Amino acid sequence: MRKAMIGGTGITPFGKFMDSGVRSLAERAVADALNDAAVEIDDIEMVFFGNAAGGLLNGQECVRGQVALRYTGLLGKPIVNVENACASSSTAFHLARMAVASGSAEVALAIGAEKMSNEDRTKPINALEAAADLDELEALKARISPDGAGTGSVFMDLYSSVARDYMTASGATVEDFARISVKQRHAGALNPIAQFRADVDIDEVLSSRMIADPITLMMCSSIGDGAAALVVMSEQAAAKRDIQPVDILATEIRSGQGDDPEAPPVATAASRAAYEAAGLGPEDLSVVELHDAAAPAEFILSEQLGLCAPGEAVALLHSGRTALGGAMPVNPSGGLISKGHPIGATGAAQLVELADQLRGRAGPRQTEGARIGLAENGGGWIGHDAAAAVVTILGATARH
């Protein structure tokens, strides 16, 4: 396969925007991405539209991309609707990369957009619940909340169960989880598109409302709205434009095998494949964006991605290596905890952040000398693991 590159990116602010819908959010992200890539609508040959829960949140099913992009000038082109839980837009990006790498397109567009804020606050909770196996939902709830005292959010109860297991296995404390939130909120305070843009301290995190012991409110990602888009192009198409592209070194997608106790975690399986495809290892990474839907996830995923040895993620945090200004910042965007988590847009937003880092455009969050970035985007839950994971590795290039 030939080389594929990111030619341009666009992203909206993340937050709760009651007057904005998927269409207006997507339109803004697409316009900015096309402008950044120096391409016109006519240059786009294929479109991959990631949206996780539009049908459950606003009733729009079947043709979500066509509806959202109706007034952009993209109708008439192949539009592929992509749904893969919280990994929807990273999956869309994977497909756009494959379209260009295979020669099926010179220029493709990957989009992620989600509108989660709703006057009916039960709708987002119910939509997220549908990212698990509904036939076994009651059994899952009984396993993770055996006393029946769940929060009403299956994923918050799940993160609580996982956090307690990790504390037992590693010796991590609730204060360690709070330090993750402090780190993410500091990065988010420097990110102009982040949903939460204020520094907090450990005491504030620990004293925020308990959601599912030991997880407090400030350790959680939040429901929100937003969109992100990336123009993917061939090396030849990039060479014709006055842009600074980003190399796509690997995109790997795997489904979780949570029913098999011998199978590696899905994030591990996807990252191993990505490292092999890129000819790199964790030691080569300059910057990482990972799926911190709740604070304990950064520890767990750091180990699953090989950023540190098993049981060493807390020490990695305390070393300062993963903070802004450290040797390998993790979630310099603020992560899902601070930047926000409009589920269908999350994966694309991670890639926008990495592209900014690798092009030296991240402002006060910039990782000095960033050359290689990795994004891990998880989605859904099956058995004892995420249902999907997409791992992408990007590399810096010189300006064309």
Image (tube, rainbow, N blue to C red):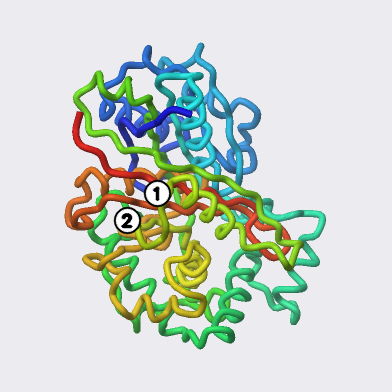
Residue for badge 2: 333
Quadrant where the C terminus is found in the figure: top left
Q: Nearer the viewer, residue 120 or 41?
A: 41
**Looking at the image, do the residues carrying marks 1 and 2 touch, with CB atoms under 8 Å apart?**
yes
Q: In this rendering, would 97 be left or right of 398? A: right
387 horizontally vs 97: left or right: right
Please say whether residue 202 is visible from this viewpoint: yes
Q: Using the image, tell me which numbered label, if any, was put on residue 350.
A: 1
Report x, y in % for residue 64.
57, 29
Q: Amino acid at mark 2?
A: Ser
Q: Dot 2: few (<14), some (14–19), or many (≥20) neighbours within 10 Å?
A: many
Quarter of the image where one finds residue 197:
bottom left
Query: Residue drawn 50% across and 80% down?
Result: 311
Q: Is residue 178 left or right of residue 32?
A: right
| SS for callout 1 | helix
- Of the image marks 1 and 2, the number of the one nearer the N terminus: 2
